[in-house]
Amino acid sequence: MVGQGVLRECLLDPAVDSVLSIVRRPTGAESPKLREIVATDFYNLSPLSPQLTGIDACYYSIGVTSNGLSEHAYRRISYDMTMEAATLLLRLNPAMTFIYVSALGADPTERGRIMWARIRGALENALLKLPFRQLFIFRLAIIQPLHGITSRTRSYRIAYNILAPVLPLILRLLPKYATTTEQIGKAMLAVTRNGYPTQILQTRDINSL
């Protein structure tokens, strides 16, 4: 859902020359400046190396719910897959900006009782050690999907359908916790161009951008 929103804002931004989207399945998105690659193995992106050079920024928005997953399975998807992409892109584009979509509640101590929070925190810590020119972590909480964007997670779709009438009110009342797919995409472009005082951005930072 976040990826759809970020892609939309990149394609609409006249300052963005081209967008390379690495996906698990064809999205049907079309634009003269969009090139889409369906990756067969996200745990080994090195075969795509020739196509992953000359990139200014990566907006890494792959994510999965921890519901029904063991700690090993969740770590493999959330931690291992992300670090594979980040280390490869760092080698190919050391001057790039890398933005990782995390979640409110990520546990940087890596010792808490909540499994997904420990793994997210461990990943944040590992990413922050990588010497990208710029690296930012977006800790998201409540997200309102706009412009026809929907989540591919069934439980999220049900929740959003139920909350749809009150989401605009939540955005007004809880600006520290609620944002939109449009604001997330625009904030990513803003920090890529201008930087930000902190590497970890909360929802209030995203909305202010």
Image: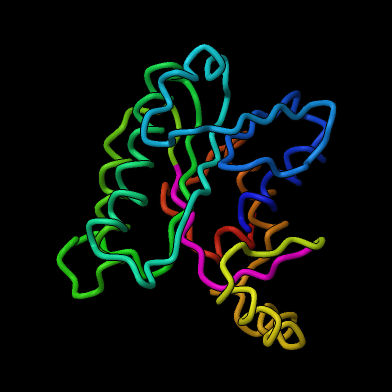
Q: Is residue 200 left or right of residue 24?
A: left
Residue lying at 31% horizontally and 32% vertically, measured from the top left: 130
Q: Dividing the image into 4 quarters, which one contains the C terminus?
A: bottom right
Number of numbered markers? 0
Residue lying at 34% horizontally and 28% vertically, measured from the top left: 87
In the rendered view, would you say 7 is above or below 159? above
In x, y percent, where is residue 160? 66, 78
Say which of 144 and 153 sits in front.
153
Res 36 quadrant in image = top right
Res 28 quadrant in image = top right
The stretch of residues the image draws in magenta is 136-146
In x, y percent, where is residue 155? 55, 76
**Residue at far top of view:** 50
In the rendered view, would you say 129 is above or below 149? above
Say which of 134 and 32 sits in front.
32
- Asked if the stretch drawn in magenta spans residue 137, the answer is yes
The color scheme shown is rainbow
Res 151 quadrant in image = bottom right
Judge whether residue 176 can be spotted in this image: no
Decide whether the magenta segment is chiefly helix, strand or loop. strand
Q: Is residue 12 left or right of residue 180?
A: right
Q: Is residue 124 left or right of residue 4?
A: left
Judge whether residue 39 can be spotted in this image: yes
In x, y percent, where is residue 42? 43, 36
Say which of 142 and 29 sits in front.
29
Residue lying at 47% horizontally and 16% vertically, measured from the top left: 49
Residue lying at 50% horizontally and 25% vertically, measured from the top left: 96
Q: Dividing the image into 4 quarters, which one contains the N terminus?
A: bottom right
- Asked if the stretch drawn in magenta spans residue 86, the answer is no
